[in-house]
Image (spheres, rainbow, N blue to C red):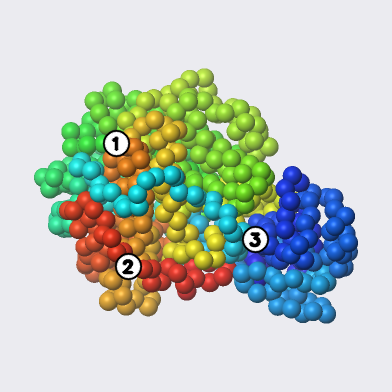
Amino acid sequence: MSLVTRDDAELLDVRHAVDDLDPDETHDLGDPVIGHPGVIGHLGDPQATRRGGRGVDRRARRLGIGHHGHAHRPELRIGGGLDGRQIAEVAVVGESNERLRSGGVHSATQTHPVRVRRSQRTPPARQLALVRRHGRVAPMVPLPAPYDPLPPPPRTGTSIPAFPAGFEFGTATSSHQIEGARVGRGQNIWDSFARLPGRVERGETGDVACEHVARYREDVQLMASLGLHCYRLSLSWPRLLPRGRGELNAEGVVFYRNLLTALREAGISTYVTLYHWDLPQDLEDEGGWRNRSTVEAFARYVSLAVERLGDLVDAWIPINEPACIAWLGHDTGLHAPGLRDTRAALRVAHHLNLAHGLAVQRLRDKGARRIGTALNLQVNLPAQDTRAHREAARLADLVHNEIWLGPLVDGRYSEELIELARPSSGAWDWVRPGDTEIAATPLDFTGINYYFPRLLAPRGPDSPSLAGRWQDIAGDEVASPTDAPRTEMGWWVEPRGLGRLLRTAHERTGLPLVVTENGTATNEPPAVLDPARQLDDVDRVRYLHDHLAEVALAGADGIPVQAYCAWSLLDNFEWACGYRPRFGLVHVDFGTGHRTPKRSARWYADLARTRRLPADPPPYRDFVAHRGDGGPTP
């Protein structure tokens, strides 16, 4: 078996694994069970049963399964760690010296300590290749069959319906990730963050990126040649207002008007995001999103942007993925500005909700007619079908989804959420009367970004955590099933999660939906780039097929999905991972800037033309091969 090493232990004790099982559930000790996230093993006689909690039933005693430290108790408990601790192999030390193999621990007869080889720490930038975008490293854990955390909804027939007329197929990008032209804008927090040692892989920056400012006509022509119906882009706040306030930069206004005009002339509708993580550095120096004055500066920026560009924009999105801004930027420190302060992160979350609402009001005041969101709502699933696991998943919904949906939909934060946060936050003195009512200013659509679901288990006394970070407060995340495909980023490929999210998001918000991001990086590290393999991105084709099938099925079930924006049009600067992950339908040679459509681009163009998914998608090539440690494919 594999495990994530801990900083504070060279020896871990093989015992107590079942102490934290649900006391109201009966478990078969011969089947795989998860006592703590990252812990799985065959725990004895297949016929033996035991109640969870601290007690031990009589039948278990007769089988020699004692309590707390009896040497013959066949249990396994292994803690996890993170912040870059690598995966290490373990073996039982003692009489049996039986190696614990990946995928399960076979029945042991004695309790032995497990000696862990301490591995080197991984720099924070590399963590994003090992850690899910909103999670952490976890060992591969087989789910107990036959439990399926994502059963399909009931329906008649098995065919995938065609997409209706009017459904839009498009792509998405963001300003800092593709624009380049650093000298034409003010400094932003990612310019600063990327220059801190170890924050971005290989010290790469977005200074040049895809040179989109210089090549926007070529990129619009590419989209038109693919027959795309829509394009989601973002405006660079520091390109329009170099210091975050003051007068508009005329050069920036001209660039965006030219770009939007070219898109309109090509018949491509636009979803324009006003903030995609590139806060002007001058505002960060004043406290950034922790400071309420940044909310006011954002509202003024929105007013200026819609005044000068609104006649060319079809739909507006105020803020992209507020969860990443708050938690990755201010709680875990993996993104700019790189803070690790949970109380500050919760303050930022509220200020983002308020900024969103003020932006919607300013957009409405200026005549904008279609406004929505780009929320990375999480699909939180119980890792086992027990009451405790279901409760962990419910709390994860509260922590990661309702902190946004409560204010945006209901105009309030739930009392349970505030109480759950109180140990980390104290009094929510940053919430002023009327704030949440502003956040709830009505919208026209709910935009959702989806990449993977999460499996949750109840927290234990030695649960792995990010030093008590907010994202771990609800429960412990366990890895995807061992037989599940994983992407180059190490992310679980589970299309049914998108289907689940479309249904729950529509039920929660009551609005039409737009998939504002969905896509995958393929296993194409530039250091060993094979041009032919690079362009034959069969894994992306299969990924898009399966996720779009869920969109089509949701539509057939009456869920009003209006558009799908694949992430991304171009290979680009992928934040802390630099240029290594390639998410684009179009390959970019970062040395020359040359663009080449991949196989997935041609496949997507056919879909946009026919509106029907092909019946025979190719099988995955690389995504089915992954290490047993929860990390990405080599």
Q: Is residue 129 above or below residue 175?
A: below
- Look at 17% across and 53% down and name the residue there: 609
> Residue 175, labelled with which disc?
none
Q: Is residue 436 above or below residue 484?
A: above
In this picture, residue 534 sits left or right of residue 479: left
Residue at image mark 2: 618
Q: Whole-Å distance between the Cαs marked 1 and 3?
A: 42 Å
- Seen at 65% across and 32% down, the residue is 419
User: Residue 626: horizontal and vertical position, in percent?
Assistant: 49, 71
- The amino acid type of the residue labelled 3 equals Gly
Q: Along the line of sight, which residue is nearer the eye, 416 or 272?
A: 416
* Disc marking residue 316: 1
Q: Pick whichever of labels 2 and 1 is earlier in the sequence.
A: 1
Closest to the camera, between mark 1 and mark 3, is 3
Where residue 250 sits, quadrant-wise, is top left
Residue 296 appears at what percent x and percent y?
40, 29
Which quarter of the figure has residue 365?
A: top left
